[in-house]
Every structure is written in structure tokens, then in C-alpha cells.
Amino acid sequence: MKLEGIRVLDLSQFLPGPHFTMMMADHGADVIRIEPPDGEPTRNIGVRQANASVWFRNTHRGKKSVVLDLKRVQGVAAFMALAASADVIVEAFRPGVVDRLGIGYDTVSQVNPRIVYVSIAAFGQTGPMVQRPAHDVSIQAETGLVDLNRGKDGQPVLPNMPSADMAASLMAMNGVLMALLRRASTGVGDYIDISMQDSLASWLVNVVGPAFGEDRDMVLATERGFGGAAFYNIYACSDGRFLTLGGSEIKFATNLLTALGRSDLIALCRLPPGPGQLPVREFLRETFASQPLAHWETFLAPLDVCWAPVRTVRQALLSEQIRARGMRVEVTQKGFGGGMVTELGIPIKFRREPGRVDPEIPQLGEHTFPVLQSLGLSAEEVSEASAMPIPPAA
């Protein structure tokens, strides 16, 4: 696989870091999860499947778990011994913490100049908000996305997807892979400063027009993508279910309105989103509300129109398309309770050396003694570094 031979030490928690290091593990990297003595928090968050939380399972498969107490001198020493032969280190503490612990980039790079070291923080490592704590919703609020999510009453609503977390995950992985590629020619690693806010802000390319071009806030009801475009909208059906139109190109409007016997409305679809398209929106609203979703699925299927039913997550993950692409996989787990488990698949699909879903997830500290003893530490030294008792077989 593409990343065989790459060793990753992951100090991060929750979502951005663990998600992207899992993707590296899917493609062959040796990912060692450095956990505190009380473990990764997501081990115990949310619904469980086969003796582990589904969240943890879908961010930690294929990894090893090494427990280190980084508040102990012995824990820091053990980490530095691991870091000396690692390729990538991932951390997501508040800025400054790793330096105070004695495991920051400047320290690690002295013993391992080839290290690629990535720090993920809410607001990055610089700026006036650098020490402010924040999780995903706070970042979405600060970056303007919560304001874009408004209910029928006009009030902002909680975003349901952790977009800031996932944007940071992907940006971190991109940065790490670029640094590894450059290291192949220079022999020197790098330090990568990833801000969740920066990552999310970079996704705003299709909504910054009013802010950059006209120095104004958006009037959501009139903007494309927020209700102002007839062919980029959500419509209710007579059975209480919904469908979406998701393509404003005039060819799609022509195809649907012709099929519905209202070609006279096509010209209005050439107007900018907003009041000019209101007659089209009203026609489509009344039309779709006249029949159940099943009727419209049959009607729309042969037409060249961007449309989709609004599915629940469960329905979506049972779809033939998701299964055909291998994004829902049923695998048999040997350890950690055993049995068949369902997991999300691998989105990056190589023709050569494809990734592999390894269903095994580590028990807390499962690999602490074998990994650290392989570095020459005694069982007693490992116990001191991890605050774990020496196992009978050690």
C-alpha cells in the first residue's frame, strides 16, 4: 500500500487528527495512537457496536494503542524514543502545550530532522484568538457558517456536520503528504500549522462573492444555494418527504419545465437568483406538493435533471451506490469483542495498491509494552512511562 513504511505518532483526540491518521492507516501507515492513561475520549462517546463506540471504531481502526503519561519524565523520555524513528507526529493540544511538555517540534527535530510534525488547533498557532478553546460549532460560528444555516423562522440553527473538524482533517493530511513528498528529495521534514478556522474558511469560495465583490452580507433568501434559485432548492412532497433540485444550468431547467408543461417559465430561470425566479419556485413548490415522493422518483428518473430525494443517513448508507463504491463495509473483527461490524469504507480508491479496511481497533494501551520494549526499554521503565502495571507475561 502507498504508505507502507511510514510511522505516525498520533497525540490528537476527538476527530480531526484521529480521522486523518486513520486514513493513513487504511493505506498502510503504521499509526501508533499515543493515549493518556484515561484513554481517548471517543472510546466512550455515543452508540456502541461490538464492544466499542462507533465513533472510535471509525477513527481508530488499524492503529496501535500506546499509553504514555506525558506529565511524567519517563513518559516524555519514552515519547522521544519513539519520535526518534517516526516519520509523522500529530498533536492537537492548545498552542504551547507540547513545548511545555518538552515534545514540541523544535525539540523533536533536534533528534529527528526528518520528522513531519503537524499541530492542529482551533485557531492555529498565531493570532489574537490562539488560546481560546473551541470545538467545531464555535469555529463554524466564528467563520460565518452558522449564520448561513437558518431555519424557516430565520434563526440560526446548529450545523449537523462537523465541517470545521473534517476540513482540518483533510488539510492536515494534504500538508503531511506534501511534506513527505518534499522530504524525499531534501531529507528534511517540516512543521505544519493547521487551523480549523483557516481550513473551513478556505471552503467558502462559492459564498464570498458578496463579501469580497460588494462588501456586504448576504441576503440569504435571494442567494443561489440558500433558497433564491428555483433549481437549487428543497421541495416538500405530498407524503411529507422531500426532494432536492441541485443544478441551476438552463438545460436542466428546460428539461424539467418542458416535461411539466411549463416551458413558458424557462426564461425566468435565466434571471439571477431572487425575486425574479419566484414564479418558478412557487410553481415547483405547488407541483411537487401534489404527489408523493415515489411518484416524483418515477417521473424524474428518465429526465436529465439534477435531483435527489432527501434520505436519512441510514437510508443513504443502505443505498446501492454507497455499497457499490465500498463505502459501507461489513467486516469480521477478531479482537475487542469480536463479531461482524459495519464501518465506513475508504474514499480514496487507487487502481494499484488500494487501501484496506482493517477492522481491528486497539484496546487501551494494548501495544504499550511490546512497542516500547522493542525500543530497548525494560518492563519497569515502560510501567513508569505509562502508569500501567506490568502485565504477567511481560
Image: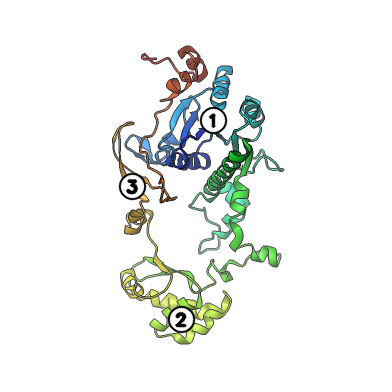
Q: Residues within 10 Å of mark 2 (few under 14, many from 20)?
A: many
Toward the front, the furthest residue is 185
Tags 2 and 3 touching, CB below 8 Å? no
Is residue 255 shown above or below 88? below
Residue 356 position in % (x across, y down): 38, 43
Q: Is residue 259 left or right of residue 380?
A: left
Residue 116 position in % (x across, y down): 59, 36
Is residue 300 shown above or below 83? below
Residue, disc 1? 86
Tags 2 and 1 touching, CB below 8 Å? no
Q: Amino acid at mark 2?
A: Thr
Q: Tell me the CA gap for discs 2 and 3.
A: 39 Å
Q: Amino acid at mark 3?
A: Val
Q: Residues within 10 Å of mark 1 (few under 14, many from 20)?
A: many
Q: Secondary structure at mark 1?
A: loop
Answer with mark 2 or mark 3, whichever residue precedes in sequence: 2
Residue 83 position in % (x across, y down): 56, 27
Residue, disc 3? 329
Q: Nearer the viewer, residue 208 or 375?
A: 375
Q: Residues within 10 Å of mark 3 (few under 14, many from 20)?
A: some
Residue 159 seen in the current view = yes
Residue, disc 2? 254
Answer with mark 2 or mark 1, whichever residue precedes in sequence: 1
Q: Tell me the CA gap for discs 2 and 1.
A: 58 Å
Toward the bottom, the furthest residue is 264
Instruction: Judge depth for marks 2 and 1 and give the one in front.
Output: 1
Is residue 40 shown above or below 351? above
Total numbered labels placed on residues in the image: 3
Q: Amino acid at mark 1?
A: Ala
Tell me the residue at 64%/65% (across/down).
209
Q: Secondary structure at mark 2?
A: helix
